[in-house]
Amino acid sequence: MSLQGITILLTRTAEANAELAAVFNRRGAKTRSLPTIEIVDPASWEGTDKAILDLARYDCVFFTSRNAVERLLHRIEQVQPEAIARLASCKIYAVGEHTEEAIEEAGLTVALTPEVHSAEALAESLGNESLAGRMFLFPKSDIAGDVVPSFLRSAGAAVDEIVVYRNVAPEGNKLDEIRNALANGDIHAVTFFSPSAVRRFVQMLGTKCIGATPVAVIGRTTGNAARSLGIEPTILPDRASAEAMAEAIERFFNPERQ
């Protein structure tokens, strides 16, 4: 199978889009980059710094994105580098392969990662664990959903939510160029790797420009966000990774070779 002749629209940060492009290019696809997200510091580090200085009170840490991992670790290095040892002693949960990779790259161990990239799936997978009385730290973005903390609290756990980064719309996008490419059929698939990317895309371009263009989402949470905004996902990979996304898109465009 191949993606020769197919052009994929990438909607993550500019840096992430560049990495994703290589994955699709290896399969013969061309890519267009529309950065919908820029990662910046939170409005205040006060809550995060307090948690870092008091990491000993937490039993578990729950990550739902690579950005959350990287931003918390970077802040720990700035505030109290020795706190990384305390973080390592916590039970760490992760959503998605990229999140798991970021944790392991830092020399930490992941206790549980679901095969499906969704907060709901991870919450469900914790159903057999005794969570009552546990203290969780939940590093997140400023627009993160409440599925995970709500589930943990309903199971009797205590949760401290800290904002370690903000998602903002980047400047300088060539919106008319992308809109015209979609309208003319020059873009054959649109990819979304997070709910925030879907929301930013709709804010920037609306939904009509997608038309009948196939939409690929990384998982159920992102798919639900797309549906809530009037975008019906067409392609869903069987696991949360760029390679799996590329494989799913390749299967979609080569049904006769499956």
Image (cartoon, helix red, strand yellow):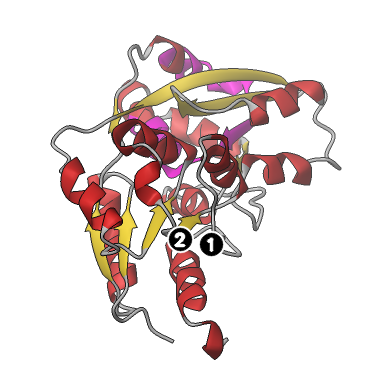
191 up-or-down from 62: above or below: below
> Is residue 62 located in the magenta-colored stretch of the structure?
yes
Depth order, front residue of 74/199: 199
> Is residue 51 located in the magenta-colored stretch of the structure?
yes
Tell me which corner region of the image, top left, top right, bottom left or bottom right, holds residue 123.
Answer: top right
Quadrant holding the C terminus = bottom right
Q: Are marks 1 and 2 in contact (CB under 8 Å)?
A: yes
Q: Secondary structure at mark 1?
A: loop
Magenta part, dominant SS: helix
Could you tell me the amino acid type at mark 1? Ile
Q: Give x and y (percent) for residue 113.
A: 63, 51
Depth order, front residue of 4/122: 4
Please report the residue visible at 51 percent of the width from the left and 28 percent of the height from the top: 144
Highlighted range, magenta: 49-74
Q: Residues within 10 Å of mark 2 (few under 14, many from 20)?
A: many
Q: Give x and y (percent) for residue 131.
A: 80, 30
Q: In the visual, does 117 lie left or right of 172? A: right
Please report the residue visible at 54 percent of the width from the left and 38 percent of the height from the top: 225
Looking at marks 1 and 2 on the same chain, the residue that comes earlier in the sequence is marked by 2
- Residue 216, visible in the rendered structure: yes
Tell me which corner region of the image, top left, top right, bottom left or bottom right, holds residue 79.
Answer: top left
Q: Give x and y (percent) for residue 77.
A: 33, 30
Q: Which residue is mark 1?
A: 235
Q: Residues within 10 Å of mark 1 (few under 14, many from 20)?
A: many
The dot on residue 214 is 2
Depth order, front residue of 116/3: 3
Depth order, front residue of 36/155: 36
Q: CA distance from mark 1 to mark 2?
A: 7 Å
58 up-or-down from 4: above or below: above
